[in-house]
Amino acid sequence: MSGNDNDQGKRHQSRMQRKKSVVDAAIERADRDQGLLLVLTGNGKGKSSSAFGMVARALGHGMKVGVAQFIKGRSDTGEEAFFRRQADVTWHVLGEGFTWETQNLARDTETAQRGWAVAREMLRDPSLGLVVLDELTYPIKYGWLDIRAVLDDLAARPPMQHVVITGRAAPDALCAAADTVTGLDDFKHAFRAGIRAQPGVDL
């Protein structure tokens, strides 16, 4: 090994030692367990996909999971087809499509409030270790659901129940209440090039 390679190896080792000390200290500071509220928002693709990845992870740990989809009115997605076959998953499709499809404010509001009654029951069920509220941000944004009532129900859930909320334009109050907020950016999307939603990737 040349002297330059040796110096580079030592610098790398020194950097990794410093990084390890920082990571170890952060792990040591994290000394409690609690149910988490996670918000996945932004204009990018992958919010629901990330949430369903957590469903798989929770099932792997032997947890029971509840899923409520607030906007999607279809029942032919790959994730639903797969997870409905899992004994420990309760799955509800509560929407009728996006508001530009229904074009009926009163009907959309009634559908959202009926859906929230279903979600509230899941948030009161201590047997559910994870609850996914898919695309919940839309009925809040459009005023179909009261944000204060939603936050109150989230706060009153069982102490170790985790909740994942997805959707664009998550309101500030929801982000403030969350333990983890992730924003997904949209840099490029096949749909804008005229490519239909593809099974296994988009559906």
Image (cartoon, grey):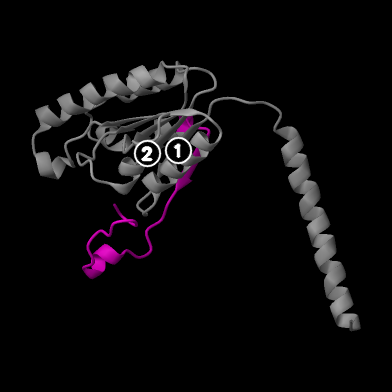
Q: Is residue 185 magenta?
A: yes
Horizontal side of 171 relative to 18 (left or right) equals left
Q: Nearer the viewer, residue 69 or 106?
A: 69
Q: Position of residue 21 (x, y in %)?
A: 81, 48
**Residues tagged 2 and 1 counted as in contact (Cβ below 8 A):** yes
Q: Is residue 61 magenta?
A: no
Helix, strand or loop status at disc 2:
helix
CA distance for labels 2 and 1: 9 Å
Q: Residue at x 80, y 61 (%)?
A: 15
* Location of mark 1 (residue): 55
| Label 2 environment density (alpha carbons within 10 Å; few <14, some 14–19, many ≥20) | some
Q: Quadrant of the N terminus?
A: bottom right
Q: Secondary structure at mark 1?
A: helix
**What residue is rendered at 33% in x and 23% in y?**
119
Counting from the top left corner in percent of width and height, residue 109 is at 17, 27
Question: Is 25 rendered above or below residue 34?
Answer: below
**In front here: 164 or 179?**
164
Residue at horizontal 22 percent and vertical 62 percent from the top: 196
Magenta region, mostly helix, strand or loop?
A: loop
Residue 31 appearing in the image: yes
Q: Amino acid at mark 2?
A: Phe
On the rendered structure, is 35 left or right of 99?
Answer: right
Task: Place residue 68 in its image quadrant.
Answer: top left
Q: Which portion, as a residue range, is magenta?
A: 176-203
Q: Which residue is mark 2?
A: 83
Foreground disc of the pair 2, 1: 2
